[in-house]
Image (spheres, rainbow, N blue to C red):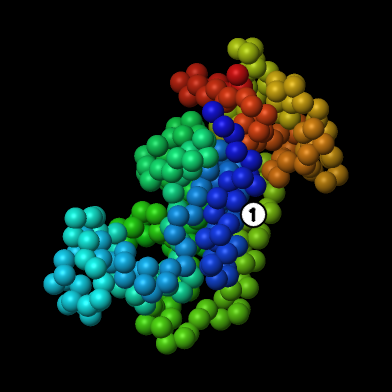
Amino acid sequence: MTTLTLTEVKSKSALKISTLEEPLRSFANALIELSYAIGIYVIITEAKRTYDYQNYLYSKGRTRKQLDAVGLYNVEPLPSLDVVTNAIAGHSNHNFGYALDFALLMKDGRTVKWDTKGDYNLDDLPDWSQVVEIAKRLGAEWGGDWRSFTDMPHLQMVFGLTTEQFRLGKRPSPSMVTAALKKIQTITATKIPTVVQSVAYTFTVAGEDSGVAFLEESTTYVPLVSLAKAIGVTYKWDNDAKVAYVNNRALSDARVIEGRAYVQLRPVALAYGKQVVFDKANKKTGVA
């Protein structure tokens, strides 16, 4: 099974992300980074759309009569396909660069899934829900919360503006964008507090106990020393900066728990070709 680097995962979405307006552009990159940190690969499947492309999408699942009824006389109907949108051109936030759609990229780097129940990072939580949770924390609105047309892949940041206002040329104010960017940057860069309310697991290596692991929400933290030894890499802890290094590479998220340095288990293990073992019943986790 292929293990992709963060750079490789981000490259899959780079072109689409480049079409977005701020703060959604920064949001998209942060969403991919924070999801990657818990072993989930996110790919952006839709970003800014042209009016022509929007009308093409609207034609899916609709007849000639239905398209004529909304003035799309020159658009070819595609009644045999599933309906994917209720918005004609100019009536979707995608048309203005303030909305995107995401999906899950599988570990082979090619397969894309819209599976809202799958647990591909093996932490007993649906990956889709974990991505949505991150997105909301970053400040996005999720189409899965809509009542009239539930749109599970859809995320947007429109600051209360309607598509009519967008069509008239109104955009989020600079202060709105700046505040949103600051929030995104803070969440992406924030170090998790030293004292946390966590669930304790036993960290095992080759079946042998090798310390205590802590699970907080969907993230597993294990002792830096134990993990480094388990995967056969060098390690260093900078106590002043509270930064952990593995093979001389700084890790983005480290913390001190009960006087010991802890790092995220999954991204480090996967980066060095190891599989994560998660035994919820016995409260054990480790590498194999």
Residue at image coords 58%, 73% = 177
On the question of residue 193 being in view, the answer is no
| 271, above or below 88, in the image | above
Residue 42 location (% of width, % of height): 51, 47
Residue beneath the point at 84% across and 40% down: 239
The relative height of residue 167 versus residue 38 in the rendered view (above or below) is: below
Nearer to us in this view, 221 or 48:
48
Work out whether 62 lies above or below 246: below
- Is 256 on the left-hand or right-hand side of 145? right
Q: Which residue is mark 1?
A: 188
Q: Residue furthest bottom?
A: 168
Instruction: State which quarter of the image contains the N terminus.
Output: top right
From the top left corner, tell me how far across and down residue 174 is, in percent.
60, 80
Residue 213 versus residue 154 in the image, above or below: above
Q: Residue at x 63, y 36 (%)?
A: 267
**Residue 284 horizontal/vertical position (percent):** 55, 21
Image quarter of residue 206: top right
Front-most of 101 and 65? 65
Q: Residues within 10 Å of mark 1 (few under 14, many from 20)?
A: some
Which image quarter: residue 246?
top right
Question: Which residue is at 28% across, 66% downward?
Answer: 58
Q: Would residue 103 appear left or right of 242 to someone viewing this image?
A: left
Element at label 1: helix
- Asked whether residue 89 appears in the rendered view, the answer is yes
The one of 185 and 29 positioned closer to us in this rendering: 29
Type of amino acid under label 1: Thr
Q: Count how many numbered circles sit on residues in the image.
A: 1
Q: Which percent across, then down, holds residue 138?
A: 54, 59
- Report the side of 243 relative to 199 (left or right): right
Query: What is the quadrant of the C terminus in the image?
Result: top right
